[in-house]
Image: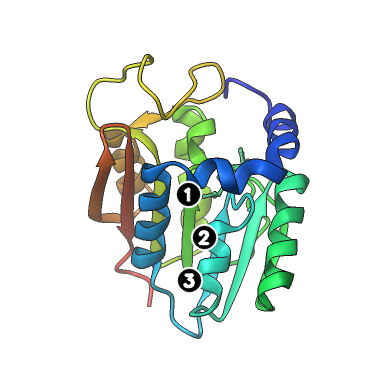
Amino acid sequence: MKKTLEEHASRFDDVAGEYDDSQNDTEEYRACVSLVVDHANPGPEDTVADLGTGTGAIALALAEDAGEVVGRDISEGMMERAREKAAEQGIENVEFGEGRFREPNVEAADVVVSNFAMHHLSDDEKVEAIEAIAELGPRKFVLGDVMFFGEPNPDEPFYSPEVDDPSTVGHLADALTDAGFALTAVEKVHEQVGVLVAERGDVE
Ligand SMILES: C[S@@+](CC[C@H](N)C(=O)[O-])C[C@H]1O[C@@H](n2cnc3c(N)ncnc32)[C@H](O)[C@@H]1O
């Protein structure tokens, strides 16, 4: 990781108030949110875990269809905004609390989602995070994020080399299959942005 967890948390605490407006300006971000929500497609009995939930864009969008949603993040400022939005929208089956990719602080989940957050971890840390996600026992993991479909180009948008550490799609696919998932969909939103859907046949 290029920055410590505390530095990432503090950076997001500082921008929590403006985060939604700034992100929603980006067509690729909106496309990822939509694809992650569509692919997650939880049922009314499902527990969904949203890791790196931020201000709850994905968690809140899935709450209507899911049984319950737990959002986990390292930035209390981002989650405070998520809680405000849940209250404004009258959503009661969602809970936000501290948790990190490699220690999600979630007992179990039927569906795990994550959007625009895992790219803060190094390649090795993403492998550990995906192993931790597999241990939650989900039948499906939907990952929307900055990821390289071609050669990494630090001059392009969608990531800041000083704070972000995106992986290649190949690295993510290997980590997912090593953790027991089968990759069932790959959605390329941009040369550096995509959504991966990983499923496990051994989970009902
Ligand atoms: C760009 S925001 C994305 C938020 C949300 N998922 C969305 O789609 O709008 C990235 C979030 O990841 C969180 N984050 C960064 N590193 C993390 C880690 N190791 N574990 C959990 N959350 C992390 C940050 O605090 C931030 O809220």
Quadrant of residue 189 within the rendered picture: top left
Within 8 Å of ligand 1, the CB of disc 1? yes
Identify the secondary structure beneath mark 1. Answer: strand
**Which quadrant of the figure contains the C terminus?**
bottom left
Determine which residue is flagged by label 2. 58
Determine which residue is flagged by label 1. 115
Identify the secondary structure beneath mark 2. Answer: helix
x, y percentage for residue 79? 72, 53
Identify the secondary structure beneath mark 3. Answer: loop
Q: Rounded to the nearest whole Å, what is the CA distance between mark 3 and mark 2?
A: 15 Å
Residue 155 position (above or below residue 85)? above
Query: Residue 110, which numbered label?
Result: 3
Within 8 Å of ligand 1, the CB of disc 2? yes
* In this rendering, the label closer to the viewer, 3 or 2: 2
Regarding residue 186, the answer to whether it shows in the image is yes
Q: How is the image coloured?
A: rainbow
Tell me the residue at 45%/26% (across/down). Answer: 159
Query: Residue 11, which numbered label?
Result: none
Tell me the residue at 33%/69% (across/down). Answer: 202
Q: Is residue 106 left or right of residue 165?
A: right
Tell me which amino acid carries mark 3.
Answer: Asp
Residue density around tag 1, few if under 14, some if 14–19, many if 20 or more, within 10 Å: many
Tell me which amino acid carries mark 2.
Answer: Ile
Regarding residue 109, the answer to whether it shows in the image is no
Residue density around tag 3, few if under 14, some if 14–19, many if 20 or more, within 10 Å: many
* In this rendering, the label closer to the viewer, 1 or 3: 1
